[in-house]
Amino acid sequence: NAGVTQTPKFRVLKTGQSMTLLCAQDMNHEYMYWYRQDPGMGLRLIHYSVGEGTTAKGEVPDGYNVSRLKKQNFLLGLESAAPSQTSVYFCASSQGTGQETQYFGPGTRLLVL
Amino acid sequence: AQKITQTQPGMFVQEKEAVTLDCTYDTSDQSYGLFWYKQPSSGEMIFLIYQGSYDEQNATEGRYSLNFQKARKSANLVISASQLGDSAMYFCAMREGANQAGTALIFGKGTTLSVSS
């Protein structure tokens, strides 16, 4: 059981380049989330989805877009990367039945030069 | 104002000793959930323990227990009999509206725990 997987694990971008981070879960979870983790800041919510075809903004959505075309996948896009987007990105999913736990992927480390 | 406050940037403990990691929270909801996650140096986020605001008993999971003091709005993590493998960053998190499925987590800034032999 793979749980939540993320690709890539690590990426270096130049300012202005674009990229897509992929999150996949095999637990049939309804809800999926993208967080970013910066030193001394804990994790902050970027965007989330409460079901296939739906997305919503979190605490720090600027500069990111997301899509949830399939229930098991949640994509995070950076259209024009900036150094401020250097961070570790975590995807998480949860069942959506109430007192559920969020399960996290291993993270993607992104460096924007 | 911060919703989740972890006042201890770093804690040091010896093997086999117990340690308490502090967490206070701020919410006006009556229904909420509190979580603790462990992040070892490898970077993954590992779920440790959950406490619902209406749970009457403190949550326990093996060597982990959550000291829930609702009136004080605190949810401290207690690790008994520390092991070297417990060395990691620990995050306290809250979901407001525990019965609202899918609400995202609000995280504290974390506490680094170092266990020595």
Image (tube, rainbow, N blue to C red):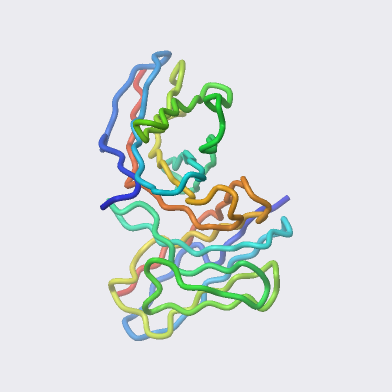
Which of B80/A7 is in front?
B80
Q: How many marks?
A: 0
Residue B26 screen position, x and y as percent: 35, 45
Residue at 54% in and 41% down: B47
* Residue that sits furthest to the top in the current view: B16
Residue at 48% in and 44% down: B30
Q: In the rendered image, is residue B48 in sight?
A: no
Residue B21 screen position, x and y as percent: 36, 29
For residue A101, above or below residue B52: below
Residue at 47% in and 53% down: B105
Which of A98/B15 is in front?
A98
Residue B85 screen position, x and y as percent: 46, 28
Which of A62/B4 is in front?
B4
For residue A73, above or below residue A5: below
B92 lies left or right of B49: left
Q: In the rendered image, is residue B62 in sight?
A: yes
Which of the 4 quarters of the picture holds residue A16? Answer: bottom left
Residue at 39% in and 14% down: B17
Q: Quadrant of the C terminus of chain B?
A: top left
Which of the 4 quarters of the picture holds residue A69? Answer: bottom right
Which of the 4 quarters of the picture holds residue B9? Answer: top left
